[in-house]
Amino acid sequence: MNPLPAGLLALLEDRDEVLVTSRDGSRTIAVPMAFAMAPPGVVYLLTSAFSRKVGRWARDPWVRLSVPGTAASAEGTVRPVTVTELDAAARRAILEAFAAAGAATSESLTQLLETGAHLLLRVEATAPGSAT
């Protein structure tokens, strides 16, 4: 796993949203999203399994994360993850970040994901040091 650049993560530390850009054919689409950060430099996104961005990511997992109001960004790929793939630190970060979305407890996060209504995605850098 390639961690996202430390500089980008430092800028995201006190923020609630990150701008997530994805490709749809020849165009790009950017949307603000809530996120969770966990060691070792990983960002997690939680979204409806039926959103348009999930369809885009299924066709092309490339994303660019940008810090709103700055020029900082990094490219990465998204990959769906299950609760069983999360270590304790990631689980804590996700529960804290997504409590308002219905993932306030470990059990509720599991239920959200197992029903298929939501997807949890991990963003990893495409290559070491892939920041702009």
Image: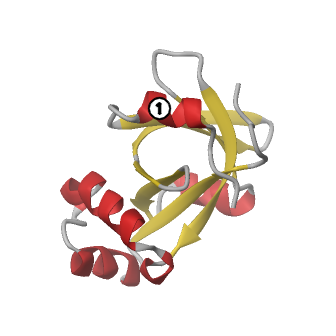
On screen, residue 126 versus residue 38, left or right, reads right
Classify residue 73 by image quadrant.
top right
Residue 74 in picture, x, y percent from top left: 66, 35
Q: Residues within 10 Å of mark 1 (few under 14, many from 20)?
A: few
Looking at the picture, tell me which residue is in the foreground, 86 or 40.
Answer: 40
Q: Secondary structure at mark 1?
A: helix
Classify residue 78 by image quadrant.
bottom right
Looking at the picture, tell me which residue is in the foreground, 101 or 83.
Answer: 83
Q: Residue at x 36, y 83 (%)?
A: 115
Q: Residue at x 21, y 58 (%)?
A: 99
Quadrant of the frame with the C terminus: top right
Q: Residue at x 49, y 56 (%)?
A: 39
Residue 79 in picture, x, y percent from top left: 62, 64
On screen, residue 14 versus residue 8, left or right, reads left
Q: Residue at x 34, y 60 (%)?
A: 94
Residue 61 in picture, x, y percent from top left: 70, 56
Q: How many marks?
A: 1
Compared to 10, does 106 lie above or below? below
Q: Which residue is mark 1?
A: 10
Classify residue 110 by image quadrant.
bottom left
Quick check: can you spot residue 113? yes
Compared to 104, does 60 lie above or below? above
Quick check: can you spot residue 49? no
- Looking at numbered disc 1 in the image, what kind of residue is underneath it? Ala
Quadrant of the frame with the N terminus: bottom right
| Colour convention of the picture | secondary structure
Residue 48 in picture, x, y percent from top left: 41, 61
